[in-house]
Image: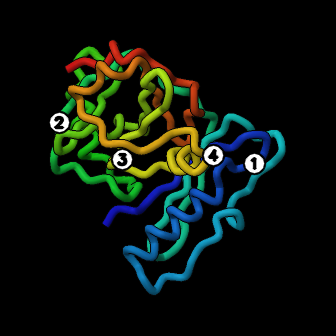
Amino acid sequence: MYPFIETIRIEQGKACNLSYHNERLNNTLHHFWPDCAGIELGEYLKLTPEMSGMKCRVIYDGGGIKEISYEAYQMRPVHSLQLVYSDDIDYTYKSTDREALNRLFACRGERDDILIVRRGLLTDTSIANIALFDGKDWFTPKLPLLRGTCRTALIDSGIIKEKNIRPEELSSYSFVRLFNAMIKWGALELSTGTIYE
C-alpha cells in the first residue's frame, strides 16, 4: 500500500484548515488501521511567523508520520479543461499513488487540465475540487473523487452546496472555480465555455 498525504497551506505562520486536515488524516488511518492511535498534526508542524505562501506536505501511514516538507507554492495556471471519462477511478483517500490520475491527465490534449466524469457525473480536476455558478449559487459535485478539506470547509460555511451535475448541464452554469488546500476560493475561476468535450 502506498503512503497517504496531506497538503497544507501555510499563511503567516499558521496552518490553514488544520482541523479539517487532522480529521481527514485520522479518518484515513482508522479506515486502514482501525487499532492505530490518532495523530494530532499540530504537534508535528514546525512553523515560524515568516512562513507564508508555503506548501507543507505530510506523508504518513499506519506507522505514523513518515516525512514533513515545506516549500514555496506557485499556482499552476489553468485556462481550459478537457472532459475525460473514467467510471472506475477511485481516489477516495489522498494517497501518494497518483498513477490513475496521471494517466487521465495525459489525455488533456491542448487543454491545461482535465475535468473527470465518473458514471455520468462531474467530479474533480486532476488537482482540485470544483464549483459551478448558476447566476445565484455555487454548486460542487456531490460525489467528488476526493472530499477536499477546503471543499468541506466551504460546505460547512454555506458558501457552496452539493449537487449531482452532469456534463450536459454545464450550459446552465456560467463559471467554474477550481480550489483545493493550496488554491484559495476565488483565486482560479474560468468561464464554463473553456470546458471542452
Say which of 3 and 191 sits in front: 191
Residue 168 vs 13, above or below: the answer is above
Q: Are marks 4 and 1 in contact (CB under 8 Å)?
A: no
Which of the marked residues, 3 or 2, is nearer the chain's N terminus? Answer: 2
Q: Which sits earlier in the primary sequence, circle 1 or circle 3? A: 1
Tag in front: 2 or 1 = 2
**Residue 70 numbered tag:** 4
170 versus 98 height, above or below:
above
Helix, strand or loop status at disc 4: strand
Q: Earlier in the sequence, mark 4 or mark 1?
A: 1
- Badge 3 marks a residue whose secondary structure is loop
Viewer-side label of 4, 1: 1
Q: Looking at the picture, which amino acid does disc 3 mark? A: Lys
Q: Do the residues bearing badges 3 and 2 touch, measured as CB atoms within 8 Å?
A: no
Q: Amino acid at mark 1?
A: Lys
The residue that label 1 is drawn on is 14
User: Is residue 43 visible from the viewing direction of this image?
Assistant: yes
Residue closest to the far right: 49
| Visible residue check, residue 56 | no
Per the model, the C-alpha gap separating discs 3 and 2 is 17 Å
Crowd around label 2: few <14 · some 14–19 · many ≥20 (10 Å): some
**Disc 4 and disc 3: Cα gap in Å?**
32 Å
Name which residue lies at 73% across and 56% down: 46
Dot 1: within a 10 Å radius of its alpha carbon, few (fewer than 14), some, or many (20 or more) residues? some
Check the picture and name the quadrant holding the C terminus: top left
